[in-house]
């Protein structure tokens, strides 16, 4: 297989011997992969600009003091890149990425079985995200997520950023319905009433969401209790706002 068609893996481990050992392991265990050694942040950024990897394997030492992990979770260029982090602890802010398979935390020296399962999960995310039951959606500031009258075929969870929902009255004036903050669902009423959108939603700042097709929504809630709790919290907040207006 030629270089351009190979799956690219970045190994960003600060210790040179461990980095080389891991590269050898990956090249031995996997076929049709291009494994690149990343020794510092400058090299990492240079290689990302050349071509986005399918997988980044790193350790906590390499990530210390930079924004590689946070950028990896939100950058449009890395939306289908998965990350395996060695010798670091799970952070609550990345729970959704963990459920999606985009991010995994492993011991500093994983067992063969842990490696096998982690790589399988990572490649499933990286190679199948576009056809999976849910995926990451990125919006730029002032970009519409949906417009009134659009089909209600997707439900979203806001991961980062800020959205605003509004309607236009008969005179074309904008009636603001409220803001959407991280952790809240967007467009969830389509699941309950199966009707077109009744409001428009726009990004106030650059935002990141999880997009779930409506036909997969019930299964997603069943498989991910944390999302069910987010839905309940979203509905409770909106009901409270509605009652306060009465």
Image: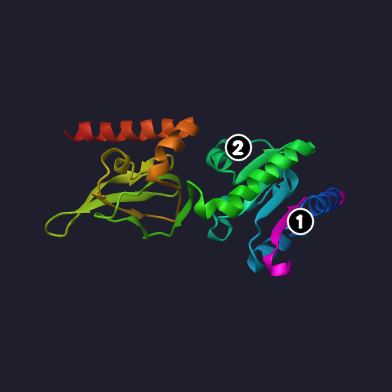
Measured as percent of width and height from the top left, residue 72 is found at 60, 53
Q: What residue appears at the point 32 percent right and 50 percent down from the top-left corner?
A: 164
Residue 237 appears anywhere in the view:
yes
In three-dimensional space, the C-alpha distance between marks 2 and 1, rounded to whole angstroms, equals 32 Å
Task: Give the foreground label among 2 and 1.
Answer: 1
Q: Say which residue label 2 marks.
A: 91
Task: Decide whether residue 11 is among the magenta residues.
Answer: yes
Q: Say which residue label 1 marks.
A: 31
Residue 72 appears anywhere in the view:
no
What range is drawn magenta here? 1-17
Badge 2 marks a residue whose secondary structure is: loop
Measured as percent of width and height from the top left, residue 63 is found at 69, 48
**Way the structure is coloured:** rainbow
Tell me: residue 54, above or below residue 102. below
Graded by Cα atoms within 10 Å as few (under 14), some (14 to 19) or many (20 or more), the crowding at tag 1 reads: few
Upstream in sequence: badge 2 or badge 1:
1
Task: Decide whether residue 141 is among the magenta residues.
Answer: no
């Amino acid at each position: 297989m030629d270089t351009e068609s190979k799956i690219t893996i970045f190994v960003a481990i600060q210790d040179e011997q461990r980095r080389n050992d891991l590269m050898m392991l990956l090249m031995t265990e996997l076929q049709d992969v291009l494994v690149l050694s990343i020794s510092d942040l400058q090299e990492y950024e240079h290689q990302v600009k050349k071509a986005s990897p399918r997988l980044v394997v790193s350790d906590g030492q390499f990530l210390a003091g930079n924004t590689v992990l946070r950028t990896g979770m939100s950058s449009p260029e890395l939306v289908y890149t998965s990350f395996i982090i060695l010798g670091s602890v799970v952070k609550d802010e990345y729970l959704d990425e963990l459920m999606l398979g985009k991010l995994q935390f492993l011991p500093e020296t994983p067992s063969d079985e842990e490696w096998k399962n982690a790589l399988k999960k990572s490649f499933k995310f990286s190679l199948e995200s576009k056809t999976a039951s849910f995926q990451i959606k990125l919006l730029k500031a002032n970009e519409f997520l949906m417009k009134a009258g659009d089909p209600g075929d997707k439900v979203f969870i806001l991961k980062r950023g800020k959205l605003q929902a509004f309607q236009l009255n008969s005179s074309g004036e904008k009636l603001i319905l409220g803001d959407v903050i991280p952790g809240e669902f967007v467009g969830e009423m389509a699941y309950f009433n199966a009707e077109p959108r009744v409001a428009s939603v726009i990004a106030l700042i650059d935002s990141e969401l999880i997009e779930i097709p409506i036909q997969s929504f019930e299964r997603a809630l069943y498989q991910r209790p944390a999302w069910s709790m987010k839905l309940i919290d979203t509905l409770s907040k909106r009901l409270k706002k509605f009652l306060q207006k009465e």
